[in-house]
Image (spheres, rainbow, N blue to C red):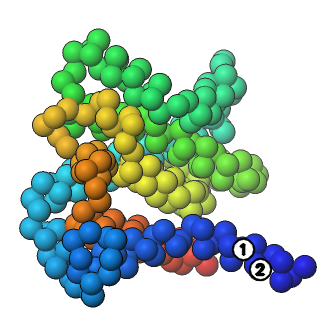
């Protein structure tokens, strides 16, 4: 039975990571096309950094991802706290709508957002893209942080009130430290969702502000270039290091 479980897990991980491993290996392939192996080289990484369009798109994507994840995490954390601590009319329907937004198809959200921006007279570009990314990242932060807060012992907050702590002091010294792992998880999830979004971004960004997922999508329709493999490899390593760093920081904080 134990052997069967290990075999099953091995197959699952192979299925998940073999494509990534193939991409990483072929990013060092000297051949221009990935059909044959012609030795190892780093020239595609050099060409990648010489490609100004890809570099500009990558900077734009990281800028939007970092900014939207910070905004979504800040608003989502406060929203989760409001759902947990306060009882107000329409609280349950509003929280249910959070899940509705999460489950809505991306194409529906993209079309609805672009219609809203057109009605408001907003020019499609960085601002509209940022607002859209905050919109679809926000529910994930709320759900993640709310799940963490729900496991709190209410007596801790009551004791702080009895000792004279105000709302801001309770949030800063009790709630925020206790929710730090969930807040970090919400930020990382938002960053990942924003960085690789294609469908919503396709509708809400303008021609003057190009982001990496859309740039790669337009390139791979004509065939995957070696520079794209190199770029995806660097993005995977960056994401992996970010997750490891976040795990280390959260682990240190909870000791």
Residue located 45% across and 29% down the image: 107
Residue located 21% across and 28% down the image: 124
Mark 2 neighbour density, 10 Å: few (under 14) some (14–19) many (20 or more): few
Say if residue 158 shows up in the picture.
no
| Quarter of image, res 99 | top right
Say if residue 209 shows up in the picture.
yes
Q: Residue furthest front?
A: 36
* 179, above or below 122, in the image: below
Q: Is residue 127 left or right of residue 98?
A: left
Residue located 20% across and 32% down the image: 206
Residue 30: give x, y in percent of width and height: 23, 81
Q: Residue furthest top?
A: 119
Residue at image mark 2: 6
In the image shown, does 19 or 136 lie closer to the viewer? 19
Q: Quadrant of the C terminus?
A: bottom right
Q: Quadrant of the N terminus?
A: bottom right
Q: Residue furthest bottom?
A: 39
Mark 1 neighbour density, 10 Å: few (under 14) some (14–19) many (20 or more): few
In the image shown, does 39 or 74 lie closer to the viewer? 39
Q: Is residue 87 left or right of residue 130?
A: right
In the image shown, does 236 or 153 lie closer to the viewer? 236
Residue 223: give x, y in percent of width and height: 28, 56
Residue located 44% across and 49% down the image: 193
Residue 245: give x, y in percent of width and height: 44, 74
Q: CA distance from mark 2 to mark 1?
A: 5 Å
Element marked by disc 1? helix
Q: Which mark is residue 9?
A: 1
Whether residues under marks 2 and 1 lie with C-beta atoms below 8 angstroms apart, the answer is yes
């Amino acid at each position: 039975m134990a052997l069967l479980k290990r075999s099953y897990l091995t197959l699952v991980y192979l299925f998940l990571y073999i494509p990534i491993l193939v991409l990483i290996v072929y990013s060092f392939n000297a051949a221009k096309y990935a059909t044959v192996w012609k030795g190892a080289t780093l020239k595609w990484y050099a060409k990648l950094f010489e490609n100004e369009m890809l570099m500009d798109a990558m900077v734009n994507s990281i800028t939007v991802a970092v900014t939207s994840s910070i905004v979504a995490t800040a608003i989502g954390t406060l929203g989760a706290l409001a759902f947990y601590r306060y009882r107000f009319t329409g609280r349950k329907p509003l929280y249910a709508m959070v899940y509705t937004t999460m489950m809505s198809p991306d194409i529906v959200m993209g079309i609805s957002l672009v219609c809203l921006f057109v009605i408001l007279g907003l020019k499609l570009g960085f601002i509209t893209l940022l607002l859209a990314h905050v919109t679809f990242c926000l529910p994930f932060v709320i759900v993640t942080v709310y799940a963490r807060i729900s496991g709190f012992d209410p007596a801790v907050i009551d004791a702080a009130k009895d000792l004279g702590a105000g709302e801001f002091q309770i949030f800063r010294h009790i709630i925020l430290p206790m929710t730090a792992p969930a807040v970090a998880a919400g930020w990382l999830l938002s960053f990942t969702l924003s960085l690789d979004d294609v469908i919503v971004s396709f509708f809400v960004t303008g021609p003057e502000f190009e982001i990496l997922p859309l740039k790669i999508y337009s390139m791979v329709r004509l065939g995957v270039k070696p520079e794209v493999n190199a770029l995806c490899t660097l993005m995977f390593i960056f994401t992996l290091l970010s997750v490891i760093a976040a795990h280390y920081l959260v682990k240190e904080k909870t000791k």
